[in-house]
Amino acid sequence: MRQLGASAPPVEAPLILSSRIGSRRVVFAANTAAQAAGLRVGMAVTKAQALVNGLVIRDAEPAADAEGLEKLALWALQRYSPMVAADLPDGLVIDATGATHLHGGEAAMLTDMVARLASAGVTARAAMADSFGAAHAVARYMTRPAVVVPEGKSAEAMLRFPIGALRLPADMVAQLQRLGFARVNDLADKPRAPLALRFGPELHRRLDQAMGRLREPIEPVRPLELLEVRRLFAEPIGAPETLARYTEKLVVSLCEVLEAKGLGARRLDLLFHRVDSQMQAIRVGTATPVRNVKRLTRLLCDKIETIDPGFGVEIMSLCAALAEPFETRQVKTSLLSDDMETDISGLIDILTNRVGEAQLYRFAPVASDVPERSVCRVAPAAPHTGQDWPEQWPRPSRLLPTPEQIETVALLPDHPPVSFSWRGIRRRVKRADGPERVFGEWWKRDAELATVRDYFRVEDEAGERFWIYRAGDGEDAATGSHRWFLHGIFG
Amino acid sequence: MGSPPAIEFLREKIRRIEAGSRPAAVALPFGLPEMDARLPGGGLALGALHEVAGGGNGAIDGAAALFTAGIAARTKGPVLWCLIRQDLFAPAISQAGLAPDRVVYAEAEDEKAVLACFEEGLRHGGLGSVIAEIGRLSMTNSRRLQLAAESSGTLGIALRRGRRQSDAVDFGQPTAAATRWRVTVLPSVALPVPGVGRPRWLVELVRCRAGESADFEVEACDAQGRLGLPASLANRQADAPAGGVRAAG
């Protein structure tokens, strides 16, 4: 719909896509507004027109949809995983093995994916499970937009789903329901022979795929202009050292390809085609375009231990899923200045592939008086800004993730406490500094319009220094609860 | 301090044997003559592993982190800080002299991953110093880290944080680290007006390779990461024990 630009109907207008079945025109898809008006997929278009006033009807274009889905698959290939395929008519299937570490884990990857698609105007639901069949069902039958089924629990989770979740033809589902099979659970432990006789092999194939008993290889999309090098082995290889040796050879030839095009790799996929026609993959990412054989080999070889070669690997292919122009830059020489800027991008890449992209960061100042909002995380390779926090008041070296409530004896409105107890230990305050008043940021949330925090730096008899605050100004109940909290610990 | 020439000669010989083919170790002085005199080489050896722990029962040790940040601030180049759970408040680290542009944090998921990142950072060679917050540190691991630090000349600091009682016991076990420090907070400098003065710490050099252990009472890091000497102590005899301090520690 976005392709229509300004002539597109408003989002709130009921909209359906129509398609033909024989000579009938039926509803192929309906948007939220149309569904709210009572229109369902499969209904006759004439009936829909009679039901809803001002209904917008467009012809469905399955070919264009498939093309769009293919594009989306290529986007996911660059961004998320080396093995992605379009799952017509409305899904993407992603084999995330060996790729989640770059995104900080499975759950974080799904949330990120749904959020990115949402910001592009696509409402998506994502699920991760042991088998493609189970993930397919979870994504369509669970209400949450991003679900990760724990490892080994997929078969159990499948049992609760209705028969329709098994990716069977619609008429077969209808027949099964007529026979009294409502859920996968009803079907799972029935004798197979009579069912197979009536419904053919399809039923149990789908069931086994969903339960993870039957492998379901996917045909990954490959962009046309992909930079790829591959190596075929007459005799399957399997030893980690051999894999590492051939990895280096592949990197050397890929770097030649990259050099010819003036590019550097940002994301590399190393695929292992095993003799049992399964695939294993390694994906590594770099912060800046890289064309250094040693560095890329090192990144890939760090991950070789995660590969299970099974009975042997017969094809290894290495491709640059994301390549960017490679800029050469003149390095400062130590002849001119002492404070040479050391390049640590190699180390950053190694660590990123070890702990994940979101787990490696620098802190940067944010203009906010509220302590927990005054810092933000930026990428480790982000340009140096030279900015610092305004150095007016001492700040605690450790900040508690959430302020912890403390019991105090204190004079209102503006005296520090005489004593307080935190985590069961009572401390007498010997010295104190404050208050430092922090106002709520009403431009962020309406509820913060009147809120106030009064921060005190207190020192107990043993010399331990704490950062405590009172919610509220000590007089007006609208400014806060007047409870005391401990927020940080000074050195 | 006036040892017989024979002893001096032997020390020099041992130093040469220990160093092997490695370049001579460089040290990072604290800038306090009292402390630097106690450390072989006149400061914290670069290209070596050091351990720092918080004193007291502290589940959360603010002073040890600042002491470490102050040391890292005085090294040249970027700093890698490996940890499991992030609870550092960056403005305070910046106030100890370590600008936010210089520190890269690596948040690993367990101690094993922290050690791996620590070693990776030490081996790289482009960093000024590497800090890792760890609970347990075995002899084998510390030896590995020490060798990694030696190979690149990077200063490594293991910031020991015990989450459980058993981790605190582990701090007593021997490791291959060059020095071991314990930093405990002391009541701040008294001011003529109400308020909290400049923080003071009791810095204990618990173990020191080729040196003796010692206690120092110092003022906390300033904006350049330098420790200060309390005014009341500046003219005192170096060996005089501080009675009140023992009770606090």
Image (cartoon, coloured by chain):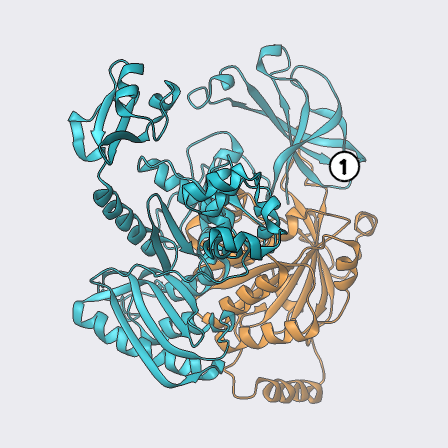
Chain colours: A cyan, B orange
Q: Is A194 located above or below residue B20 in the figure?
A: above
Where does label 1 land, which residue?
Answer: A423
Q: Secondary structure at mark 1?
A: loop
Residue A363 left/right relative to B190 = left
Q: Residue at x 48, y 29 (%)?
A: A369
Quarter of the image for residue B145 reads bottom right
- Amino acid under disc 1: Arg
* Image location (x, y in percent) of residue A277: 42, 71
Left or right: A475 with respect to A169? right
Classify A216 as above or below A305. above
Whether residue B228 is visible here, answered yes or no, is: no
Front-lying residue, B171 or B229: B171
Q: Is residue A384 visible?
A: yes
Identify the image quadrant of the C terminus of chain A: top right
Q: Which chain letter goes with mark 1?
A: A
At which x and y percent is residue B119? 54, 69
Q: Residue at x 82, y 52 (%)?
A: B246
Q: Quadrant of the N terminus of chain A?
A: top left
Closer to us: B180 or B30: B180
Q: How many residues crowd mark 1 within 10 Å: few (<14), some (14–19), many (20+)?
A: few
Report the front residue among A353 and B233: A353
Residue visible at 42% across and 41% down? A171
In this view, A117 is above or below A346:
above
Name the foreground residue: A192 vs A356.
Answer: A192
